[in-house]
Image (spheres, rainbow, N blue to C red):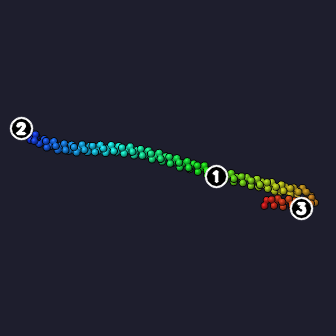
Amino acid sequence: NHDYSFITESYPKHHQEIEADLTKVKTKVANINTAVTNLITREREVTTQGEEVKKEIHTQAQVIINLVQRSERQLVEQVDTAVQQKTQLLTKQREEAETILNQLKGCEEFVEQSLKVGSQQQVLREKQNMLQVMMIVNQDVN
């Protein structure tokens, strides 16, 4: 009987303590639930922002790539134009050099043939003509 009265008397006090502690736990549960909800929301925001940043990076990279490709095309066109101009000039110079070479070879053959086949009288008669042809060809070369 004594135990029963002790329990009956002490129960309300202990019950209040337990309920007070339970209230603290419930408050912490509510606070942590709110924190978890806020963290989930923030995670979604961060993920969304990350996707937006990646899209922006991709867009900017495409702009830069397009600029680089346009610059590449312009530079290639400039090189093509320069090569074409230089090869045209070199072709013209080569053709002129070949013409001069042919003139020199013709002159050389004419003079050698005259010296080889012609008589002394013919060579002396043609001397002025041969010297004049060689002088003209030499002037053209310079």
Percent coordinates x, y for residue 65 in the rendering: 54, 48
- Looking at the rendered image, the quarter that the N terminus falls into is top left
Q: Which residue is mark 1?
A: 78
- Looking at the rendered image, the quarter that the C terminus falls into is bottom right
Q: Residue at 64%, 52% (x, y): give it.
A: 78
* Camera sees residue 131: yes
Percent coordinates x, y for residue 8 in the rendering: 10, 40
Q: Residue at 82%, 55% (x, y): give it.
A: 103
Foreground tag (3 vs 2): 2
Residue type highlighted by circle 3: Gln
Q: Which residue is mark 3?
A: 128
Residue type highlighted by circle 1: Gln
* Camera sees residue 120: no
Q: Residues within 10 Å of mark 3 (few under 14, many from 20)?
A: few
Q: Which residue is mark 2?
A: 1
Percent coordinates x, y for residue 53 in the rendering: 45, 47
